[in-house]
Amino acid sequence: MSEIQKPQWLKENIDLKSLNTMGLSVSARFFAEVHSLEELQAALQWARLQQVAVFPLGGGSNVVLAGDYDGLVILIRIIGRQVLKVNEESNQILVKTGAGENWHQLVRWTLQQNAYGLENLSLIPGCVGAAPIQNIGAYGVEIKDVFHSLEGLDIQTGQIVVMGAEECSFGYRDSVFKGECLDRFIITSVTFALSREFQPCLGYGHLQKEVLKAAGTDAVTGRLVSDTICRIREEKLPDPEMVGNAGSFFKNPVINEQLYQELSSREPDLVAYPAGEGLWKLAAGWLIDRCGFRGLAQDNGAGVYEHQALVLVNRGGASGRDILELAENIKQAVLERFQVELEMEPRTY
């Protein structure tokens, strides 16, 4: 690549350690930080002309960087939050936000606008653009429950696309962007359908007990639910600023009735929840804990968080390959003991 072809905004050989919550030190051959649709289109056009692969990066909270990236890493920093429309009859409020917005800050902002529906998703790390890809969820709420539409760019053509919920094919921690549309689009904005009327969703685990305890004699509010969930998450999960991690590392597996009966007969305290007719969802953290991995600290820095076995950590110096090797060991142990196959949540690059 000649100097004439190199745009001013393009950087080379950039260490991504500070841009992924696992704290993994890998290098991007090319790097661009974009703050607008136009800048993103320019970066994609350059990548097409140079015939290099593209890796969009937001908060870096759901990726495991296994090695140096021989392509263009595009850091998405497209921000902006606005109320698009309020339906007085249905109390629905449409909120549009840029893909580069911090997720938790968006949740707090919607509460300030008296727009409800995201409070159960408080303190989830990362940026807005990743939320539909992963169909993030917590405490009984998923993105699909409050999703309206999204805008993005086709990586190959640079064309703008608009997609609704049906086109996104949401599933449990899944969407079309992890399947047939993998590596095809970069999300630039997301619009949520929220409500002016606060209706608390407290049916998950011990959340209702914790919220009512915090409320005392006062009314339950969206802010109170958000604050309570923040406190619970801070007690259970490590701060990425202190301990490198990518949050929940494995999906909670879903099994059939027959396997559930077999496991529950020999594991009386098996943690499981109904997941539809003839299906049960198991707590992956419980399975991993039972295999003896909770609190593991390997010499290479890879380990398992002592307060939540679902979280793999980088205690310092671990490589992406170290983390993935530990993940494979955990998957094998769970499979051998419970005949259950775990699936990773983070994506590997």
Image (cartoon, rainbow, N blue to C red):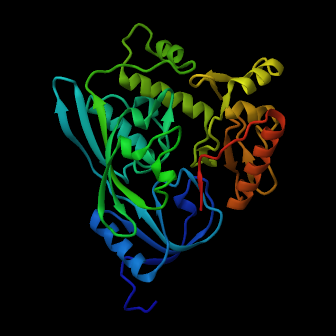
Which quarter of the rendering shows the C terminus?
A: bottom right
Q: Residue at x 36, y 52 (%)?
A: 99
Q: Residue at x 37, y 24 (%)?
A: 222
**Is residue 2 among the parts visible in the rendering?**
yes
Snapshot quadrant of residue 279: top right
Q: Is residue 281 left or right of residue 231?
A: right
Count of labels shown?
Answer: 0
Looking at the picture, how far across and down is residue 295, in whole percent? 76, 39
* Residue furthest to the top: 217
Considering only vertical position in the picture, is 322 above or below 308? below
* Residue furthest to the left: 88
Considering only vertical position in the picture, is 187 above or below 270? below
Considering only vertical position in the picture, is 24 above or below 295? below
Q: Residue at x 58, y 62 (%)?
A: 17
Q: Residue at x 38, y 88 (%)?
A: 5
Between 27 and 336, the one lying in front of the other is 336
Looking at the picture, how far across and down is residue 305, in whole percent? 70, 40
**Is residue 319 among the parts visible in the rendering?**
no
Looking at the picture, how far across and down is residue 127, in whole percent? 43, 49
Snapshot quadrant of residue 198: top left
Q: Is residue 66 left or right of residue 117?
A: right
Looking at the picture, how far across and down is residue 270, in whole percent? 74, 22
Between 236 and 260, the one lying in front of the other is 260
Considering only vertical position in the picture, is 310 above or below 327? above
